[in-house]
Amino acid sequence: EFNTVCAFSKSVIRFLLLSLTASISLKLDTLIGWEWMAVFWAFWIVFAFMVLVSLGVVLVSCGAGFSFISGSIQANEFFVTLWVFYSIVGFTFTSLAFVINIIKYAGGEEKSLPQAICVPMFYFPILVIFTILVYSKIPIWYINLTRQQSQAELSRESNFTTEERRLGSNTTMTTEMREKAEKYKGVKPKKPNVILKLSSTYFKRVEQAGNALFG
């Protein structure tokens, strides 16, 4: 499924790039009378997707920040998360500023061209320096972000589902409870670690409060 998604994404990006190139060429040849804002329609589609990705990165970064403050993650992992934040969110809005200034320049505002050049010249050197600083830590961060639950977590969930199956044979259980026990029979749920990172900061506090209240 992942390979299929990647192949589809590449095809869509290729199509949008070709469409953008064709639109600009037709506009420069005066074969179409569109405004320059409309000529870059393919970019606006990509930009909308990039904004959604940036929102997800912001959430992950916030989760990493809370975890770093609470001591759940190390400084190296937090700084790599900041690098991802700067890379994706920074690129999203750098590309927006670049395209807007190019559109203004194409519309006759000559002073917009230096601005279009200055924005990437400010963003990319910082990105290169940041990347050099955290480069050796990126593979470890990626593994920690995408790895599945630890063996201990899976063992606890296995014991839970075993208990459900044991209770499922009790004749006093409701039909709904039996169906639920049968549904999870032999299943070991896996949760991406990125979800655990986002939720751990909040739910650990709730769990501790619950233990203090009912324990």
Image (spheres, helix red, strand yellow):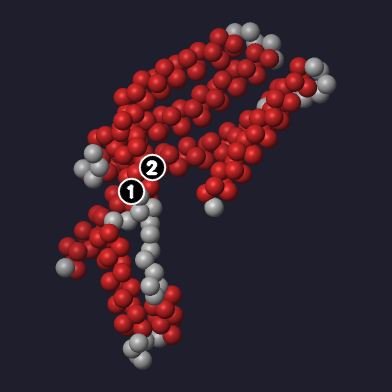
The location of residue 107, given as percent across then percent down, is 69, 15
Residue 75 vertical placement versus 199 (above, below): above
Q: Is residue 14 left or right of residue 139?
A: right
Residue under label 1: 197
User: Is 213 or 41 nearer to us in this picture?
Assistant: 41
Q: At 33% from the left edge and 48% from the top edge, which residue is drawn?
A: 197
Residue 210 visible in the shown view: yes
- 66 sits to left or right of 178: left
Q: Quadrant of residue 98?
A: top right
Callout 1: helix, strand or loop?
Answer: helix
Q: Which mark is residue 211?
A: none
Q: Left or right: 131 with respect to 41? A: left
Q: Residues within 10 Å of mark 1 (few under 14, many from 20)?
A: many
Spot the residue most to the bottom. 171
Q: Residue at x 40, y 86 (%)?
A: 174
Residue name at image x 31 percent, y 82 percent = 166
